[in-house]
Image (cartoon, rainbow, N blue to C red):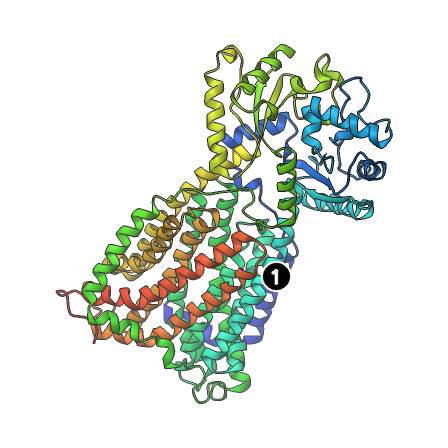
Amino acid sequence: MTRSNWQARLLTLLKTRLAMLWLGFAAATAVALLGLLKLTFDDGLIRVFESNLPWYAQYSEFRDDFESDAGDVVVLFEGADFAQEAPLRVVSDFLLDAQFIEGVGAGISPLSLRASMDSTTLLIQIPPPPDLAQRLDVERAQSMNLARLMSADRRMMLAILPIPEVAEDMITRARTLEALENLTRAHAKDGVTITLSGYPVLRERMVAGLLRDIVFLNLVGTIVGFVVATLTLRSFTLGALTVAAPATSLFWVLGMLGHLGISINVITITLPVLVLVLATSDALHISIDIAKQGRDDPARSTLRAVRRIAPGCILAAITTACAFGALTLSRSAMISDLGLAGALSTTLSVLAVLVTQTLVFTSAGRRFSFDRLFAGKRGTPAHLLSLRALPRLSARAPRVTIALALTTLVATTGLFLTAEPRYSLYNNLDADDPVLSSLRRAEAKLAPVSALQVPFEVVDETTIAIVHDAVSRHVDPSRVLSLHSLDAGADSLDSLPPALTRRMISADGDRAVVSVLFDYVDAAATRRDTDALNAALADDPALADLTVAPTTGLSVMSSYVSEAVLRELNLSFAVAILASGLLIGLWLRVPRLAFLALVPNVLPVTIIGAGLVLTGKGLEFSSGLALTVTFGLAVDDTVHVLNRLRLNGALHDPTPSAVARALHEVAPALVVTSIVLTFGMLGTFLAETPTVIDFGALSISVFVLALVADLMVLPALLSVLGGRSKPRRGLP
């Protein structure tokens, strides 16, 4: 069937079967609602590292054999001398009650340690305060284990409550942590404050922050879209009609994510708001064009505007989908999921916009008539929004503009490629977060809570002693922990507390581990410590006949995997560039224009990337993803300029006057959509998750620079290098 026949049939449906189309729309929305109810949230602390990389495989094997610290709830007791009976009773009562909470395993605390002078539990019989103070001081001097759990002034005590079975189950974990939080409030008395921290608590705070952020970000994005649409179209009614499309797009996309089982996490949290602002941009382009059509027949005018703008919207969506699709090359399961989710979301989004705009404006035109909706200057953006000064400035010296752009592109690309990966397990929490603060206080007065784990095959207890001593020769011996260092473990493994046994020897007894406590700073520092320890152990002759595995642990694994995954993002960016150029070239059938179109879109990304290097921030997950994804969004404006040239019949020979006309027609929409993109992301500055804030700041920077590049660099390139004839002078 020819294109004209399809258009005629669709026009007939709009005129005679509009109610039926609305029923289909309602059915699709109902399906989205069912998916929305299935939407889940995930902190992503572990899953972002799931990959086929060797460091993750080593960590997975370690977690299978030993109990990891990833499930440890760290309980910090502060504020009183624990040689006094009342404060000590607070600790005892809390730990006793905690054991009855579902999911909480046997704890590790000063109350569970063995005394050095006998086989009884250290505090099973509480003597008078002076005697207890003396006993604690003596025990602390003789036992590194007590020194790690109680400060020298006896005003800080640490306990570890493992919840490994529930750490990966968000619902059960939340219930367990809530019960522990209730205990802290019930038992905090007699001058004792109780604070929960550790990885499970950090993860739960991340999930709570994600839930609040997604509601807040999309609410702000919707409000901003409505305000900008209303001001641009000079009509409250038109603003409301226009914002219906991005709202539908957001709803459908969230429903799709729920049906596909793709959770909202620290990586995907920005996807819905990106879809929202992108859909608002497309909807505004269509609304502005509807205002330019004839007003005698709402269905015909709406369909004609949608038909004219749809190719640009679809191509823009496909190029953005390509940018997301390039992320599927990542070996991180979570980033690959983001790539798939983003590609599907942008495709579904443009479909939602085209369908919703068609139905909404056709129905509104029937109800109110277009003469009334678009009376006066309604639907026509103010000329101020065209920013004519920028293309005029470029037109005065187009060759100079091109030379500066290309020089900057080469220089910033070189800098961008030198960006070093940066990662910390605490990236998603504020530096002054109370959970982090309690960890820092504990580390300052007691011992580090992070550990490098050295697994090895066990022959007998002598093997454990050999590996322990070898590790102690290369690090601070006071920070080395193993079965050999435990007070009760010298004669029999059976005498060890179960909570310690599970993290120091495997269930089958074939493997053991030596832990090195260390001050976690970031991934780079952890890699340096790990490399140094592995090299020292590899050269230690005492270990020549033993099977010692590479150092592992959550901190170690995340440090190496994050470096590899972040470096792969440059490959994703390169693939996104090539794919976008290829698609634009196929659509335009003018390869040189496709090549020229990439320059003003790659340039903003490399400028921001170079800035990350010069400021010392390096390449983080937020910045790496932001630069790749926003490149796809930045291409949108360029596509709309080229689409306008196509509609004007000047695509194959874009003369300076043709370029000037296209910019005059499309610049207001470009400025408005850039405003939507920018202001729609401003809500990220008030988000609770630091990586969301960074993502928003970088995205806004790219959007602003991309608009400037499209209004200055693109017209210069088109007017000088885009035509068939010899290079011409600039725009009039």
Residue 33 x/y as whole percent: 63, 61
To which quarter of the image does residue 80 belong?
A: top right
Residue 198 x/y as whole percent: 65, 40
Q: Residue furthest front?
A: 130
Which quadrant does the N terminus fall into?
A: bottom left
**Residue at 63 percent of width and 46 percent of height:** 437
Residue 240 x/y as whole percent: 54, 77
Q: Residue furthest left?
A: 726
To which quarter of the image does residue 37 belong?
A: bottom right
Please give left or right for residue 146 compared with residue 64 in the image. right
One can see residue 231 in this view: yes
Q: Is residue 10 above or below residue 112?
A: below
561 or 664, which is in the foreground? 561
604 or 690, which is in the foreground? 690
Residue 650 x/y as whole percent: 24, 71
Please give left or right for residue 274 compared with residue 610 in the image. right
Q: Which residue is mark 1?
A: 215
Q: Amino acid at mark 1?
A: Val
Q: Is residue 150 above or below residue 24?
A: above
